Image: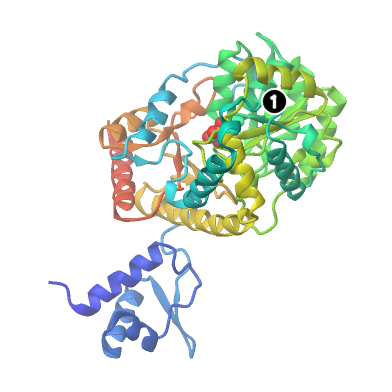
Amino acid sequence: MKKLYEDIADQIADQIDQGLYLPGDRIPGVRKLSQQFGVSISTIVLAQRLLEDDGRIEARPRSGYYVRAQIWPIPELPALSRPLRRPTPVTGQQLVLRLVQTTNEPDFVQLGAAVPHASFLPTRAIQRSLSSMARTYGNELSTYQFPPGNPELRRQIARRMAEAGCQVNADEIIITSGCQEALTLSLQTIAGPGDIIAIESPAFYGLLQAIETLGMKALEIPTDPQTGISLAALSLALEQWPVKACALVPNFSNPLGCTMPDENKQALLTLLGEARIPLIEDDIYGDLGFDTKRPRAVSAFGSGEQVLYCSSFSKSLSPGLRVGWIVPGQYREQIEYRKYVTSLATSTLAQYAIADFLKQGSYDRYLRQVRRDYQRQVAIMIRAVGKYFPVGTRVTQPQGGFVIWIELPAKVDSLKLCQQALIGRISIAPGPIFSATQKYRHFIRLNCAQPWNDTLEQAMITLGRMVHALNTAS
Ligand SMILES: Cc1ncc(COP(=O)(O)O)c(C=O)c1O
């Protein structure tokens, strides 16, 4: 049986693993801990010695105990991607539907789709807005709210876009049913079947699916896991191929989590402007940076005329309400009409509810909290990968959002891993669905917006074991 001090040491170690104390943080002193755990000071002293022996904490003269930096090795970053350098049709997306379907199955550990666990979302506040709007607007809610959409919502969005450096007025915004619809409308408006779309590599699978269903071709461009798309490679590609549009996630991209530095954003606009190629900018994660300063949108660096800015509240407020928007620059009329013929309108109640929530002014307070939560979750998951996955595994270090991209040892087939994990009721996103040509066979993406608890830790241990087994199988 465990001694009391061992049990206390385990509990402090758990707090460290859960990110309550980060490497370099001072843990509370003996008196405070003895009060906190309701045990004697000598028990705490023994527990601290044990943690020190285990290498979890270190004593600093006259200052107390501190969490040791890098208790587990922080894995290295993956290298710059090297996709196939020619346009190709998109294949291999069928698996994704199965993956997203698991998000509706409560007994799955949801590490696959990039959907935040409900506990991170302001669900109560949104429910209050829904009921209040339903009471206030009764009959009006049964009618269509035709494009461009709810005027109050568009006003609120225009205000928020100033945070991203974009001077936009409400008339320039069209409400859509999520960001996915905004992306699809943009592609349909700018390009046609057979046309080439330049994208990051790896890229968000929803974008790949839109390119696939519209019969277009994807030209995957090498992308750095910290600074985003390689402008040198893009420039070369534009000289070589008749690219019709460029579609990117410049802030906290999915799956790499990278953000383009400001100078790259400016240079990108110049490059595309000279080549007269429009940019489809997906800024869905822009509000979710770990830094207090929100990164600027690419469209903030120019007039916005050549940019179709797309976003939604799916990652920050509610994926289920399906409210997104687009600022289509010079394509406003075409997009407005296309939105109307595609889906008539976005849910009236959902638009009213989000407008009401934003009007109340608590969005910024909520964002401050959730950014910290996601930063912590991402840090814990990266540490868990360092702890449970084989040496040599590489992981991105996103500065925002809530997904991590993991390069497994080259021998590990992520599609096999995904199948095995699904049997174990764990969903993960295998690398090939992030590429038009099913590259990234030994990569996976994990959703970190899940509360860290025993079930999740067990899932990471299980995944680590599966990866080890696939890596050593002959
Ligand atoms: C980069 C990116 N764009 C767009 C979407 C789709 O957003 P929505 O649910 O608002 O349609 C997602 C969702 O995963 C995403 O990660």
| Structure colour scheme | rainbow
Image quarter of residue 8 = bottom left
Residue 247 lies in what quarter of the image?
top right
Residue at the image position 66 percent from the left and 8 percent from the top: 194
Q: Residue at x 68, y 16 (%)?
A: 188
Indicate the secondary structure of the residue bearing disc 1.
loop
- Picture layout, residue 217 above or below residue 259: above
**In which quadrant of this rendering is ligand 1 seen?**
top right
Instruction: Point out residue 214 in the picture as x, y percentages from the top left corner.
Output: 60, 13
Image position of 156 (left or right of 432):
right
How far across and down, in percent of the image, does residue 190 sit?
A: 74, 17
Mark 1 residue crowding within 10 angstroms, few (<14) / some (14–19) / many (20+):
many
Question: Quarter holding the C terminus?
Answer: top left
Nearer the observer, 267 or 165: 165
Query: Left or right: where does residue 251 sit relative to residue 427?
Result: right
Residue 82 in view (yes/no): no
Q: Which residue has dot 1 on it?
A: 147
The residue positioned 46% from the left and 48% from the top of the image is: 449
